Image (tube, rainbow, N blue to C red):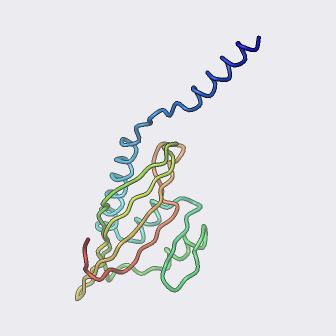
Amino acid sequence: MKKIMICLFTGLIAFSCNTKTVDVSKESEAIMNTDRAFSEMSKKEGMKKAFLHYADSAVVLLRPDYFPIKGQDAFEFLQNINDSAFTLTWTPDNAGMAISKDLGYTYGIYTYQTKDTTFQGTYVSIWQKQADGSWKYILDTGNPGVGKNK
């Protein structure tokens, strides 16, 4: 009996240490494509409409000179933006994915353009997979850049 218990225990340990590799590249690419579509919507239909469309109901916005703007307050903050005098677009550089494949992030460079001025900065968005399989961002933040790269 003791030998059986030792064998079972050893097998349990060996089984639990087996780290199965989960391919998350497909979901990472889905987030990258969602982020690209998000930027394209911002370019064509306006930043406000795009940010409202892709936001999760529990969204958190991190903006300069504000404490975290959460949930309904974030939607009200976005609704009050007048985006008629500028265009905001971005390009994701990379994405990462949780092994659970329901939470991920993108980061990259954004471009803010008015009639007279263009400047760039960096951003990070954290995405959560929705029940219907789509992705919504749950956290968004950005920082102004100074034009230095790598």
Please state the horizontal and vertical placement of residue 12, each as a whole percent of the image: 64, 24
Q: Residue at x 52, y 42 (%)?
A: 100
What is the quadrant of residue 120 in the picture?
A: bottom left
- In front: 150, or 131? 150
Say which of 51 and 79 sits in front.
51
Q: Is residue 6 left or right of residue 18?
A: right
Dividing the picture into quadrants, the one containing residue 150 is bottom left
- Whole-percent x and y of residue 143? 40, 77
Foreground pick, 81 / 35 = 35
In the drawing, does residue 115 fall left or right of residue 95? left
Residue drawn 73% across and 17% down? Answer: 5
Q: Is residue 100 above or below residue 111?
A: above
Task: Locate residue 14, reporting x and y percent.
Answer: 57, 26
- 21 is higher (above) or lower (below) than 72: above
* Residue under the image location 32 percent in, 73 percent down: 88
| Residue lying at the far right of the rendered structure | 1
2 to 140, vertically: above or below: above
Q: Residue at x 61, y 21 (%)?
A: 11
Q: Is residue 123 left or right of residue 79?
A: left
Question: Taking 9 as reference, is 78 left or right?
Answer: left
Q: Quadrant of the N terminus?
A: top right
Percent of width and height locating residue 27: 40, 44
